[in-house]
Every structure is written in C-alpha cells, then in structure tokens.
Amino acid sequence: MRSPILRRIRIVVAALVFICFFLMFIDFKSLIPANYKDSILFFQFIPSLLKFHDLGTMAAGGFLIVLLLTLITGRTYCSFLCPLGIGQDISSRIGGRIKKKFKRYGYKKPFTIVRYSILGITVVVTMVWGVYALTLLDPYSIFGRFMTYFVKPVILLLNNFMAGIFGKFDNYSLSHVPVIGFSLVAYSIPVAFFILIGTLSLTKGRLYCNMICPVGTFLGLLSKISIFRIKFNDSKCTRCGRCALGCKSSCIDFLKHDIDTSRCVDCFNCINTCQEKAISYGLFKIKKEVHETDESKRKFVAGSLMLLFGLSDILQGQSKDIPKPRKESTVKEERTCPVCPPGGGGIEDFTKDCTACSLCINACPNGVLQPSVKQYGMANIMQPVMDYHKGFCAYNCTVCIEICPTNALHPMVLEAKKLTQIGKATFIKDNCIVKTEKTNCGACSESCPTKAVHMIPYEGNLVIPEVTEDICIGCGHCENSCPTVPYKAIFVNGNPVHMAAKKPENEESEIKTPVDFPF
Amino acid sequence: MKRRDFLRTSVGAGLATGAAFSFCGYEKLFASLPSTSAAKYDMVAVMGGKPDAMFDLGIQELGGMGTFIKKGQKVLIKPNIGWDVIPEMAANTNPLLIKRIIEHCFKAGAKEVYVFDHTLDNWVNSYKNSGIEKAAKSAGAKVVPGNSENYYQQIEIPGGIKLKTAKVHELLLETDVFINVPVLKNHESVQMSCCLKNNMGLVWDRKYWHSNNLNQCIADYALFEKKPALNIIDCYNVMVKHGPQGVSKEDVVEMKSLMLTTDWVAGDAAGARMLGVPVERVEYIPIAHKMGLGNINLDSLNIKKIKM
C-alpha cells in the first residue's frame, strides 16, 4: 500500500488512544466507569503480561494480541497503542516546529548492544528478583507517572482556579480539589525520565524507544519476522534521501535500500514523504540478517544501568519537614510494617506485581495512596502505600482494586474488602487527649466504620478509646482523624499478609419506639 | 428607615456588586442581623408521621416559613451529611425532610436556597449516598461543596473560652437566613449529636475542637453571631448507639418525631430526653445554658406537642 491514508489512520487512532489515556489519568471526579478504563488498559503490554502471569485467564490476554499484531504488522503497537510512544511523537512534532531547519533524523546505526543489554537485564531482573526493572522501564508505567506527578496537579490547579471564579458568581458546579503533593524523593525518578525522554524525543525522535525501552526492543525482535513491512521499490527510488530525513526512528538507510524493521515503528511518514512513491507497506519476502555482538560494550551498558538503579539511593537524603506541634505528643508511633492497599494480599504479594504506574494513586478519591519512598524498601520506590496522615481508606470504596491493570491488586468485591484486614489500629494512651488534657475527644471512634475503635469509661465522665483488633480492618480513618501532633495517639500498623477481619456484631437496642414525648 | 433595614439593604447592594465589596468588613454586618423569633411557641414537637408531613404540620404551628424568611432572601440549610451511608442508617439528616424544607423556603419567597456540609467521609459519596444531594436539587436548592479550605473564612468568637476563632463556610456569611437541620443521634464521645454538635460541619478545622476541650468548643461556637433562625431536629430514625456513624441497622430506632425550635440549647435538651441521656451527661448543654445561649429547662418553655 502506498496510500497516504495509512499515516492518517495511524494519527487518528493514536490521537484517540492518547486522549483516552489522558482523560483516564486526569479523571479526578471518577466520571469514567472502571470497566471502560479496563478496556483502555487491556492492550498495554507489560500490565497485561503481569496480569496474565497471575491470573492465567484470557481476560488478561491483551499482550497476546499485541504479540500477534507485531508478528503480522511490525511495531504498530509503538505508534498506535503505546501512550508514551504517542506522547513522544507529539513532543517530536513540537521539536520540529521549534527547530525546522535542524536536520534531526537521517539514518543512524542502531544501539544494538545497549538495547539488547537493557532488554536482557530487564528479563533477568524480572525473572530472578522481581518487578523492579519493569517498574522503572515499562513505557505505560512511565507515562502513568508523568501524568500523575506532573500533569494532574496542573489540571487540578486549573480546576481550582476555575472553581474559584465560578464561586464568585455563585456557581458551585465545579468544586475545589485539594492538590496533594508527594514525597520529594518519589519525584526523582519521574523527573529524571521526563528530562531524558523529553530531550530525546524533542531532538532525536524515537531514540528512547529504540535504545532503552525494553518493550520496544522486544517487539522489534519480533517484527524482524513480521509479515507486513515498509519496503523500497528499487526501480522508482531516486535516492533523494527525504524518507531517511523524515524517519523519526532513523532506521532508513536509503543508499542501501535497507530498512531496519527492528526499529521501524510503522508511523508511515516515509510513505507520504516519498514523492516518487517508491516506498510502500506490504507483504515481505524473507531476507537474512546478521548481528554481531561486542562484550565490552555490553558490560559498559550493564554498568550504566546499575548506576541508573542506584540513582534512587543517591537522592535519598531529603526528608519531609515536620509539622509544627500544636500540643506535643511524646510517644513515637512504632510502625513495624507499612500498609499496602486492600486487594494487595500482603506486602510481598503486592510489591512483586506493581509497576508503579500510579493509576490507583490518581484514582483514589481520598488521597490515601501515596508513592512509597522507603516503606517497601528502596527497590520498590514509587509503589503505592497507604499514608494515613494524608487520607484514609473509605469503607465503601474499591476504586483502586477495580482499575489496577497488573493484578497487583487482586479483584475483590466490596463486601469482601470490608472484611479484609490490611492492618490493625494501635492505641497509644500516653498521647491521647483524654489522658493528657483530661477532656473528651473521640475523633478516632467517631470515624471508625466498624466500631473496632470505641469509647470506654475513663476517669469521671470521661471516655477513652479502646481497640477491638479482630474487627479492625486497618482503614486508617482513626489515625487520620486523631488531632495529636507530632505523633498520633492511634495509628495503623500494617499486616505483612492481609487477614480476614471478623464481622462486627450488633444487637438490637434497649431503647424502643416512643409513644409520647419524654418532656 | 430602621438601622437594621439600612444594614440589610446595604448588604444586599454590596452583594449585588459582587467582588467590589471588600471581604474584611461585611461579615460583621451580617453578624449583626438578629435571628428572627416572632414564633408563637418556643418549640413545636410532632410525632407519628412521615418526616415531610410532620414538618408541614410543625411549621404551620409556627406561622409558616414566612415567619423566618423574607421575600428575596438567601437561605442556608445545614443538614448533617457527614457520612457515606444510606438514609436508613440515620447518620445523616432525612432527605425527605430536607426536600420539604426547601420547598417551604421557596414558597415563602426565598431567592436562593443552599445546602452543604463539611463531611467526614468522602464528600461526593456522602452527598450522593445520603440521598440529600438528589432531594435538595429536585426541590431547586443549590448543593455546594464544603471539602476545601478555600470555601472557609476566618471569624472571631469574642466571648469564646477555648474557641476564639474559627474558619466557617463562606455561605454561612453570605446568606441571609441560616436554618440548622441536624439529625438526633448518639455520639460515643460527647454522648449526643444534635443542634450544637451539627455546627462542626460549618467549620474547617475540627481537630482544634477535638484537642482543646471539645465540649467547651461546641458551646463556645454557639456564641458566634450568625445564629440559626430555626432548628429543625430530625428524629424520624434515631441512631441510639455506635454514633455518630453507626455500624448496622440494629443501631437505629424508629421514633417518627420532629422538633422545631428557635432555641438550640432547648432543642439539645429535648434531644437528650429522647435518647434517654441525662442532660448533664451531655456536657456542652449545661455549659451552653450557663453561657446564656439558650434554656435547658424545658418545663419553663412554651412547647406545643402534636401527635399525628
């Protein structure tokens, strides 16, 4: 096919996909139903692969379709379905506008050793140690973090600005949404990647996809045997080189009439660029290719990658500023285990599957999910952790469970979630207002949805909290409500493995329907 | 022209010109508006009907909504919407009652009716699952968020012992009439939540109250000059234990009652009786009584009791 329609189709599909992802990540009012989000996420390669690995059902078979698609059409995934890839295309286009004269592309040799080393290391790390390399390099998760860390706060600020103006005119259809910032350390990796991918895409097109992205490299391997490819018509070509200059993958060697299919992302720009119509997309007849490897280069790459992993440790030094105490509490909370979201099953179970795409952090209506720093260990940085100083886990909510694309949060119905104990409330009497101030408070018991935290008689007319551990689900509403600073008088200690909570028992009251007013 | 009429007119004009009016001064002007109390009874208590029917009867006994609202006024209705639970749990004010109150406000000539609460659970879900958002909107009221500090403005409470300042929702300051619509329920810590306790949903920083003698703060807030023109106490379904949120329906007793009063301390005293709690045990009630904020002695009040 030589028709310019191919490129147009690519742009339309890519734009739709990008808009869907964009809306999904800025959906702070939860307007998009979870099942829509699930279908948008279905084709994301790494999340689908992880989910399939866990569940083994075809409901998570999106990656198989991607594999098939790649075997037939080449790396169309990278141009049509990958939000990070599409985002880079947009960035490249902006780069082209800014520096039109600058000949950015043109044929370049592939970074063969770099890319296969990264792919190899990613595979080995994932199989031997866990999800760490995927967390760092999965393009969907990188995109998710860009949206969560950089784009959504801007959208919220815009919303709040508009809500302010509307409010002045007595219109409350928009509402303020508090913007919750993350721990500074958690920003380090997204910022580094944003600079890296931003610069590369502005100046070099798809270099990130063809040098670093393990998904791109893997699909590139497959596309070497794909059925449909971009190809030259030798007799028509005048070797003008326009195609090579317009190729954002820098994969067209027009002098040799050779196209590196492992790097070609099927953007179809070259078809439109070629005035002689010498380039087309169609069935391919097999040709053999030979690759050479260089061990020293491979070692260098491995070394640099380790440095990249080490980056998070280097940036560890910054700490949060401590809130100014209004009334000093004295006993520090001894949290021996962080609290991971319901559906996670337990710390180990959860952290092994989460690629820190941050979709749940984005979607949580109560702001309780925060990117972790050291809670799960530095290697698991950015995976969501429950932060009860910022929010609490709403009793009637399963939003994070519903949208998790990797099955790190296993499907769970609301009734089951209400009986899942992710942690246990622990009461520190010496910090409690009732003891230190001798006045009633009860903020914790007020908030407790199961009454695991309830009030018992104390001195005189005072009542003081008590925790019934077996009906506590660890939602953290008590910790969130507790007014003491700097240490809370009640806090939730995570369960390393989530447990079943008992259903709260309740009896009919002795008070009956009155027949007359008692006054 | 009377002084208060002058104030009223000038405030109205100020609002009409919108942002031109500086924020620093006008809350005090509002504050000087007295709560209307031209009603025949100190309290009307109705028993035995549906929430809306009981309100129809009760407000009629007080001379209709026109006793409390003048034509063209803006009205704030403050229910309890604190929790993300269904109406049957009675943790929030009955939506049927809210709807009927709004209808009466418009019938009395209210220009605009606003409804909001500073919820404890997620506000979107609480507004929705309490049924109040839908009920209020269907009656034509504006349902306003209270989830962000941006909506709250600093006020002074000169006579407060523990609570001397607070940040209250802008609507409390911008509306002409404030109608307090609490639901009567048990509260594990301060024993009861009713009229005065419902004020905690008007303010931003509740943690300050909790950590600085909660009972005194609840009473102190009642000193603030913008007082309710009317308190409508929902006792249709009453949470008698595990309050203020409740665990299950076993916590709720159907009392099919409604109380209307201009005296919120008397309203709280009546509420305590309904719950079977000694009034002295609900510490903020006697404190408020001693501070002269209302009358705890129900026997000395003119109370109209109606059974349907």
Image (cartoon, coloured by chain):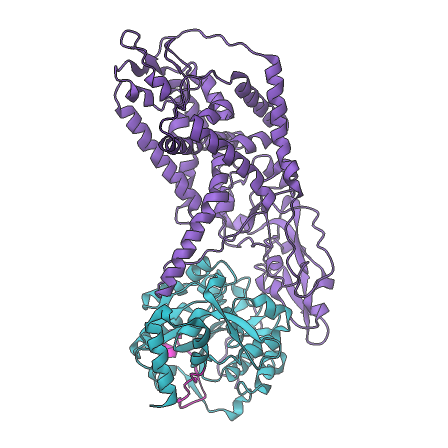
Report the residue at 53% width, 83% height from top: B265
Chain B drawn colour: cyan
Residues rendered magenta in the picture: B32-55
Residue A276's spot in the image, x, y percent? Answer: 25, 14
Is B33 covered by the magenta stretch?
A: yes
Report the residue at 41% width, 52% height from top: A158
Q: Is residue B305 above or below residue B246?
A: below
Residue B96 visible in the current orientation: no
Viewer-side residue, B76 vs A414:
B76
The purple-coloured chain is labelled A
Q: Is residue A389 above or below residue A115?
A: below
Residue B142's spot in the image, x, y percent? Answer: 36, 66
Q: Quadrant of the N terminus of chain B?
A: bottom left
Residue A376's spot in the image, x, y percent? Answer: 64, 41
Residue A389's spot in the image, x, y percent? Answer: 60, 55
Report the residue at 55% width, 43% height from top: A343
Q: Is residue B115 above or below residue A254?
A: below
Report the residue at 58% width, 12% height from top: A294
Q: Is residue B179 left or right of residue A116?
A: left
Number of disc labels: 0
